[in-house]
Image (cartoon, rainbow, N blue to C red):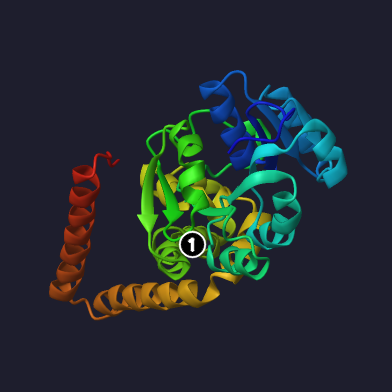
């Protein structure tokens, strides 16, 4: 990924300076202090916060024009750190500014289709880091956000080899998946659907507590806090994400509803045996998951 003669050495353009984009800029800047990182962010507040982190040399309110970028030299890497609908729209323009472009969207099918339609398969790397927090915005960005985390890359996209050294600098471990559909189906079960389960638990608390919610708030233990933590997330990111992956997410939600209904039936019928069986099955499923994760070198809470 070498720029043209006279280009800036080791330069990166991050489109979207929220939590993820700014954390990635911080991680790359920490790993390579001489790196020149520019950002693109529409929000004036977020532009100021992103600049205050020290990760960016400059943050633009919009993508620079190609002729302006050519005068300063092409970027080695362009990173789309925006919701999936915006990533699809901004991909062609970003590819005119950078030698290679990668995205970090949590839904892959739309952005992969956009890259193929634009004839950008040779220079586009579909990726997705399994990292984040319930907080949003550059003020919450962290340079260590990706350390030890899984970073998914899709097979069959040559540019993924070009971005691999950049990803390794963040401390993440790369995991390959064969297709966008495999990725999106997995995300429905391990991320998107779980997110909605967390929100549903919070809404169920509000409904059942009613006017007593204020009194009950101080009674909640760590289980409640853990399960409902994701309900703090900003909805602006989740609406396009869930909509783009709706086919897989609705399958997960129907399965979740069936599991909850099975618990409700066992309780309605005071069927201790059925309840014990379901609790045991859930425990064994969790232990099997922990064994797999720990075997692959991660730790589980």
Regarding residue 80, the answer to whether it shows in the image is: no
Q: Residue 181 location, x and y as percent?
A: 45, 70
Apparent side of residue 275 relative to residue 137 in the rendered image (left or right): left
Taking 286 as reference, is 204 above or below it? below
Question: Residue beneath label 1, please?
Answer: 192
Q: Identify the residue shown where x is 15% and y is 70%.
A: 277
Which quadrant of the view contains residue 207? bottom right
In-front residue for pair 251/98:
98
Which quadrant of the view contains residue 77? top right
Outermost residue toward the front in this view: 5
Taking 74 as reference, is 90 above or below it? below
Outermost residue toward the top in this view: 33
Which quadrant of the view contains residue 294? top left
Query: How dense is the environment of label 1, judged by Cα within 10 Å: few (below 14), some, or many (20 and up)?
Result: many
Q: Residue 136 location, x and y as percent?
A: 63, 42
In-front residue for pair 48/257:
48
Q: Secondary structure at mark 1?
A: helix
Q: Quadrant of the C terminus?
A: top left
Q: Identify the residue shown where x is 73% and y is 36%.
A: 39
Apparent side of residue 214 relative to residue 182 in the rendered image (left or right): right
Apparent side of residue 177 relative to residue 244 in the rendered image (left or right): left
Regarding residue 194, the answer to whether it shows in the image is: yes
């Amino acid at each position: 990924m070498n720029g043209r003669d006279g280009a800036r050495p080791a330069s990166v353009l991050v489109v979207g300076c929220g939590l993820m984009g700014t954390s990635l800029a911080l991680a790359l800047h920490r790993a390579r202090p001489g790196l020149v990182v520019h950002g693109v962010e529409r929000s004036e507040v977020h532009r100021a916060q992103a600049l205050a982190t020290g990760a960016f040399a400059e943050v633009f309110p919009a993508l620079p024009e190609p002729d302006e970028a050519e005068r300063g030299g092409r970027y080695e890497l362009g990173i789309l750190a925006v919701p999936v609908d915006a990533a699809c729209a901004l991909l062609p323009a970003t590819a005119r500014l950078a030698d290679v472009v990668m995205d970090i969207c949590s839904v892959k099918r739309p952005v992969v289709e956009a890259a193929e339609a634009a004839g950008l398969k040779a220079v586009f790397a579909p990726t997705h880091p399994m990292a984040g927090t319930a907080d949003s915005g550059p003020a919450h960005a962290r340079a260590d956000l990706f350390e030890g985390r899984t970073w998914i890359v899709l097979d069959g996209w040559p540019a993924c080899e070009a971005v691999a050294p950049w990803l390794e600098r963040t401390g993440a471990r790369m995991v390959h998946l064969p297709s966008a559909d495999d990725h999106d189906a997995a995300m429905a079960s391990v991320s998107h659907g779980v997110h909605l389960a967390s929100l549903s638990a919070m809404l169920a608390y509000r409904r059942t507590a009613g006017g007593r919610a204020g009194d009950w708030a101080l009674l909640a233990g760590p289980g409640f806090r853990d399960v409902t933590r994701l309900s703090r997330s900003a909805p602006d990111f989740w609406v396009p994400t869930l909509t783009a992956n709706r086919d897989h997410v609705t399958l997960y939600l129907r399965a979740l509803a069936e599991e909850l209904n099975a618990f409700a039936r066992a309780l309605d019928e005071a069927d201790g045996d059925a309840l014990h069986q379901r609790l045991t099955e859930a425990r064994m499923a969790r232990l099997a998951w922990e064994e797999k994760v720990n075997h692959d070198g991660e730790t589980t809470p």
